[in-house]
Image: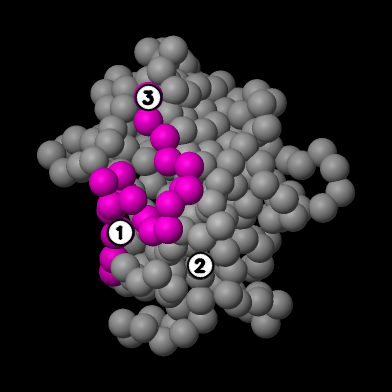
Amino acid sequence: MWHDEFDGTALDVTKWVRETGGGGWGNNELEFYTARPENARVENGQLVIEARQEPFGNRQYTSARLKTQGLGAWKYGRVEARMRIPRGQGLWPAFWMLGDQIARVGWPACGEIDIMENIGREPRRVHGTVHGPGYSGAQGVSAAYDLGTAGAFADDSHVYAVEWEAAAIRWYVDGALYATVTPRELHGPWVFDHPFFIILNVAVGGQWPGSPDSTTVFPQTLRVDYVRVYQK
């Protein structure tokens, strides 16, 4: 019912909004999200979000954060992306969703569905999480998926998805189901019965991943082949 295959020559501004700023984003992140093509662009049939080590806006790193807020939001369905994540200590790529009434009710009352998050010190692990009232932040209801073969998620592209319906959300990597959340798993209300918009970003630093160190190589890229939303 909605998709972006990134086949054009530039980011489709009828589908994506570039969020900007460098205030830490509630997680003590270190990057400044810019609206520059250096940090988010379409090339060779992919969306490229690039994290760079460079001074900008009183920060020492730049990156990008794209969202569909105001342009696209969906209630239930399968939301998936095929992408290759960056690597390195302090990198934090994410593919996630927020309830579209966030401006009115705030977070976490709006609900948050994290389809895929990775922190650089865990190269073989990705996380799927929901946040809501009574189960937000470190208390989010979460599960992890570990790569069964040698190597890291950053070595290749993988398909990350959720299937979301009235009383269940299921997480998949490359078609393998690894987690299911229903209302009975939550320590608070089920806040996943209204439209959500999509976010793609690469954070640098923050409480969860920690800061980059001498082993971290920049620039690093998140390369997205497509984002698709299906309705049952």
Task: Check the picture and name the quadrant holding the C terminus.
Answer: top left
Pick the front one: 167 or 84 = 84
Q: Residue 52 placed where, x, y %?
A: 51, 76
- Most extreme residue toward the front, as rendered? 8
Q: Quadrant of residue 56?
A: bottom left
Residue matched to label 3: 1
Q: Quadrant of residue 222?
A: bottom right
Find numbered disc 1 in the image and state the secondary structure of the residue it sits on.
Answer: strand
Mark 1, other Cα within 10 Å: few <14 / some 14–19 / many ≥20: some
Q: Tell me which amino acid carries mark 2.
A: Glu
Q: Kindly identify which numbered label has been placed on residue 45.
A: none
**Point 51% across, 81% down: residue:** 53
Residue matched to label 2: 50
- Most extreme residue toward the right, as rendered? 150
Find numbered disc 2 in the image and state the secondary structure of the residue it sits on.
Answer: strand
Task: Please say whether residue 13 is visible from this viewpoint.
Answer: yes
| Residue range (magenta) | 1-21
Left or right of 35 in this view: 157:
right
Magenta-highlighted stretch: main secondary structure? loop
Q: Residue 7 placed where, x, y %?
A: 48, 48
Residue matched to label 1: 18
Q: Quadrant of residue 33?
A: bottom left
**Point 85% across, 43% down: residue:** 149
Residue 155, placed above or below residue 111: below
Find numbered disc 3 in the image and state the secondary structure of the residue it sits on.
Answer: loop
Disc 3 from disc 1: Cα separation: 22 Å
Left or right of 160 in this view: 13:
left
